[in-house]
Image (cartoon, rainbow, N blue to C red):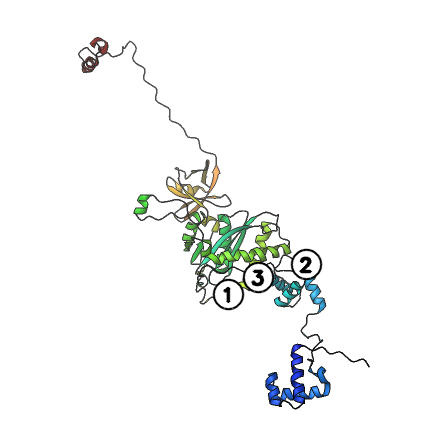
Amino acid sequence: MKQERVTLSQKELKRVKIISTLCNGSMSNSDAAAALRLSLRQTIRLKKKYIAQGDAGMIHGNRNRQPKHTIETEVRNSVLQLFQEKYSDFNFSHFTDMLNELEGVKISRASVARILTAAGIKSKKHTKRRAKLHRGRPRKEAAGMLWQTDATPFEWFGKGNGYYALHAYIDDATGIVTGAFFTVNECMRGYVEALKRGIVKYGLPMEIYSDRHAIFRTTKKLSEEEELMGGERPLSDFGKGLAELGIGQIYAKSPEAKGRVERLWETLQDRLTAEMRLLGITDIETANKALPKLIAKHNKKFAVKAQQKPVYAPVIEPIDFELLFAHRDTRKTDHGGGISYNGNWYAPISVPSGSLLANRSVEVRETFSGKLYCVAGRESIAMEKRPKPERKSKPKPAKQAAPSGSKAYKPAPDHPWRQYSATKAKKSGISSYTAAS
């Protein structure tokens, strides 16, 4: 009969040596238990097992057995195949979320990492972050106290499909992305549309924290006299709209100052890009329609709880965001309420409004859609383009002809003018006759 070969580990060899010594009577049960760091009862069990089975009795009973929680080979192969064929641009954490949500594979992130790492695949997030060089600012106590905002150009629809700008607002206290909107370039319309989505859903925040872009802060500088008088720099069109809503502004002096929104881009450029690719989104219009659901999914995973209750101000009256954040200018109206703007002539659409605007300075607002309004007090009057009225020029008075037979006036010889000219000529060395004539 062929004898079975037994292979013992280092720990099991130690047990064999101590238990064999115990069985020989050279060691007591209590001394063996202390050497093995086991209880007395467990040591006695091992002694009996060694006497009955020999060295093989020291082998752990689960050796060569597959644990009950072991991931099946089919699941491993399925995870690996899904990543290679469908989710290759997802990081390991994001891929795990998609497996649990969409693919019906209930698996942990650690298990996914082990399966993919064993296949030689590295996560997009495998690089270590640099140590922080500055102390992080603590979060605000309540949602609605401060929204950070920014925009970033990126290839959101995949490499080679062009750069587009995503504008977003994030609540400082909770990390909730309150609104986001895509445009071709960073512009005021993108910020306004993202702000609109946030205000409609949550309410009016207390302050907006932004960089010093000309959209938020006008580039006009004060003169020395205005600075000495304590004058303030005029607000931009965006700032005027926020002021009417009662929202304050804070300008960051560095990107690190508004680090909450800066770190948001790292997450969205990784996760949002991959999910839009999965949904087949390749244009701005479709992306803006899908953004609310995608942002809600992001907030569900990354939002945190604030220390206090939200402090959002409720929206009492409907807000016309397009008119509120329009480009503003001033003009002087004529007797019919008409104005000249950008080389064209505009007049009120309704006749009664013309008398309201007649002969006064008004604020002119041009919306993103190209509509024109004149604001007089609390009235916003729509204007329409019309042919420029022709001005009737007054006839010039005809020159009176000299009477017939009249001669040109000639001063007398003793006229003061002649006396002055003669004196001046004498000083200059000119004959009096020449000067007088």
Q: Nearer the viewer, mark 1 or mark 2?
A: 2
Residue at the spot 68% in from the left edge and 58% down from the top edge: 84
Instruction: Name the residue carrying label 3.
Output: 297
Which residue occupies the foreground of this view, 399 or 295? 295
Q: Nearer the viewer, mark 3 or mark 1?
A: 1
Q: Mark 2 is on which residue type? A: Gln
Give the label on residue 304, or none.
Answer: 1
Relative to 69, 150 lies left or right: left
Compared to 33, does 150 lie above or below?
A: above
Marks 3 and 1, Cα distance to the nearest angstrom? 14 Å
- Is the C-beta separation of discs 1 and 2 under 8 Å? no
Q: Secondary structure at mark 2?
A: helix
x and y, in percent, of residue 144 in the image:
45, 61
Which residue occupies the foreground of this view, 257 or 189? 257
Instruction: Name the residue carrying label 2.
Output: 84
Q: Mark 3 is on which residue type? A: Lys
Residue at the spot 61% in from the left edge and 86% down from the top edge: 33
